[in-house]
Amino acid sequence: MKNKLFKIITLSVILVSTIILVQSCAVASLPSEPMNFSKSSEKGLLVGSVTFPTNKPNFNGYFFRLTNNTSQEFQVNRNQSGQLDGGRTYLFAIERPVGASEIPSVRLFHNSGMIAGQYDVKTGGFSIPYEIKKGEITYIGNITFNDYAKKGDTVVALNNNFEKDIEALKKLQPTIDWNSAKNDQNRKIEYNNKKARL
């Protein structure tokens, strides 16, 4: 009996530790506290949104990778409703170092509740390039992520919802001067020969 209880406790500790480790490497997509970003900031601000086809998540964690001289992920927490489109669209605003960068992949975390049922899926095959400038707000666009994609479906797409997203961000983070946000209407997603798939 003691042996069985010890195994259950050990597995529980490993499970909780794994979840904390997986999520600790990511930043929140949109802070709940007021942001202090301004034109005098040493970094730039990357903003946009992520939309999913349904309100029901297919994975436990969604981590969008940001690269340049430092690699970072931002997490979309689907345990909470998004801010737009009936809860399916999640806004993000993340301070980033100056320089050319991209979003090249999404890491998906699945946890069935058992250690053997935990795994990460990394979906690449695309790039959303952008450049961060000191004290500027860069709007990357609306990323559509189809977490229920079947073979041949487009998993990741990019749209421009500048006015809609910025208006919503103004309400959530009113301390920032959103009138200075840059809208690059020519920004495109680039696909490579390893098309994103789940």
Image (cartoon, rainbow, N blue to C red):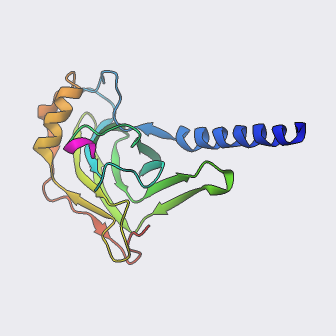
Query: In this rendering, does residue 66 appear at all?
Result: no
Q: Quadrant of the N terminus?
A: top right
**Residue 123 vertical placement versus 92 (above, below):** below
**In the shown orientation, is residue 137 left or right of residue 58?**
left
The part of the image, by quadrant, that contains residue 47 is top left
User: Residue shown at 34%/47% (left/top)?
Assistant: 99
| The magenta segment | 85-89
- Farthest residue, direction right: 2
Check residue 88 for magenta coloring.
yes
User: Residue shown at 22%/21% (left/top)?
Assistant: 175
User: Residue shown at 17%/34% (left/top)?
Assistant: 168
The part of the image, by quadrant, that contains residue 87 is top left
Q: How many marks?
A: 0
Closer to the camera in the image, 2 or 101? 2
Q: Quadrant of the C terminus?
A: bottom left
**Residue 120 vertical placement versus 3 (above, below):** below
Residue 170, x across and y down, in percent: 17, 29
Query: In this rendering, does residue 198 appear at all?
Result: yes
Q: What type of secondary structure mainly makes up the magenta span? A: helix
The part of the image, by quadrant, that contains residue 27 is top left
**Residue 102 vertical placement versus 95 (above, below):** below
Residue 147, x across and y down, in percent: 38, 59
Check residue 50 for magenta coloring.
no
Residue 86, x across and y down, in percent: 22, 42
